[in-house]
Image: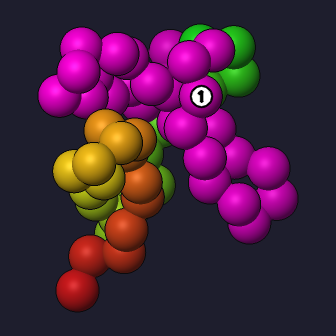
Amino acid sequence: MGYSHKNSKGITYFLHQRGKLFYFSKSEDESIDLPAGYEIVENSRTGLPMLKKKQ
Protein backbone atom coordinates (compact mmCIF):
# COMPACT_ATOMS: atom_id res chain seq x y z
CA MET A 1 0.00 0.00 0.00
CA GLY A 2 1.37 3.37 -1.01
CA TYR A 3 0.99 6.86 0.40
CA SER A 4 -2.57 8.07 1.05
CA HIS A 5 -3.86 11.52 1.98
CA LYS A 6 -7.31 12.36 3.33
CA ASN A 7 -8.22 15.93 2.34
CA SER A 8 -10.29 18.46 4.26
CA LYS A 9 -13.46 17.22 2.53
CA GLY A 10 -12.88 13.65 3.75
CA ILE A 11 -11.88 12.13 0.38
CA THR A 12 -8.85 9.81 0.35
CA TYR A 13 -6.34 10.15 -2.50
CA PHE A 14 -3.39 7.86 -3.32
CA LEU A 15 -0.04 8.93 -4.78
CA HIS A 16 0.97 7.55 -8.22
CA GLN A 17 3.86 8.08 -10.62
CA ARG A 18 4.11 7.92 -14.41
CA GLY A 19 7.68 8.62 -15.51
CA LYS A 20 8.71 11.88 -13.80
CA LEU A 21 5.07 12.91 -13.21
CA PHE A 22 3.57 12.46 -9.74
CA TYR A 23 -0.21 12.62 -9.36
CA PHE A 24 -3.00 11.76 -6.93
CA SER A 25 -5.90 9.46 -7.73
CA LYS A 26 -8.80 7.90 -5.82
CA SER A 27 -7.60 4.47 -7.02
CA GLU A 28 -5.35 2.52 -4.63
CA ASP A 29 -3.94 0.27 -7.42
CA GLU A 30 -0.19 0.68 -7.99
CA SER A 31 0.16 3.59 -5.53
CA ILE A 32 3.67 4.52 -4.41
CA ASP A 33 5.30 5.76 -1.21
CA LEU A 34 6.01 9.45 -0.65
CA PRO A 35 9.41 10.26 -2.23
CA ALA A 36 12.12 11.76 -0.02
CA GLY A 37 12.38 15.55 -0.14
CA TYR A 38 8.70 16.16 -0.94
CA GLU A 39 5.72 17.32 1.11
CA ILE A 40 1.96 17.40 0.53
CA VAL A 41 0.06 20.66 0.18
CA GLU A 42 -3.67 20.97 -0.41
CA ASN A 43 -5.43 23.39 -2.73
CA SER A 44 -7.62 25.40 -0.35
CA ARG A 45 -10.37 25.95 -2.93
CA THR A 46 -10.70 22.47 -4.47
CA GLY A 47 -9.23 20.28 -1.72
CA LEU A 48 -6.95 18.44 -4.18
CA PRO A 49 -3.57 17.35 -2.76
CA MET A 50 -0.37 18.33 -4.57
CA LEU A 51 3.24 17.23 -4.20
CA LYS A 52 5.76 20.01 -3.49
CA LYS A 53 9.53 19.88 -3.04
CA LYS A 54 10.70 20.81 0.45
CA GLN A 55 12.89 23.88 0.63
Q: Is residue 38 visible?
A: yes
Residue 4: within the magenta? Answer: yes
Mark 1, residue position = 25
Relative side of 26 to 11, left or right: right
Relative side of 19 to 29, left or right: right
Quarter of the image for residue 29 reads top right
Question: Which color scheme is applied?
Answer: rainbow
Q: Position of residue 32 (x, y in %)?
A: 57, 34
Q: Position of residue 37 (x, y in %)?
A: 34, 69
Residue drawn at the location 38% of the way across and 25% of the way down = 4
- Residue occupying the far left of the picture: 8
Given residues 9 and 4, the one toward you in this image is 9
Q: In which quarter of the image is the C terminus?
A: bottom left
Q: In this view, does 42 lie above or below 6?
A: below
Given residues 21 and 36, the one toward you in this image is 21
Residue drawn at the location 50% of the way across and 26% of the way down = 14
- Residue occupying the far right of the picture: 19
Residue 23: within the magenta? Answer: yes
Q: Position of residue 9 (x, y in %)?
A: 23, 21
Amino acid type, mark 1: Ser
Q: Where is residue 11 in the image (x, y as percent from the top left)?
A: 34, 16
- Residue occupying the far front of the picture: 45
Task: Give the residues in magenta.
Answer: 1-27
Q: In this view, does 31 lie above or below 43?
A: above
Residue drawn at the location 42% of the way across and 58% of the way down = 51
Given residues 20 and 46, the one toward you in this image is 46
Quarter of the image for residue 53 reads bottom left
Residue drawn at the location 62% of the way across and 54% of the way down = 22
Quarter of the image for residue 47 reads top left
Give SS at disc 1: strand
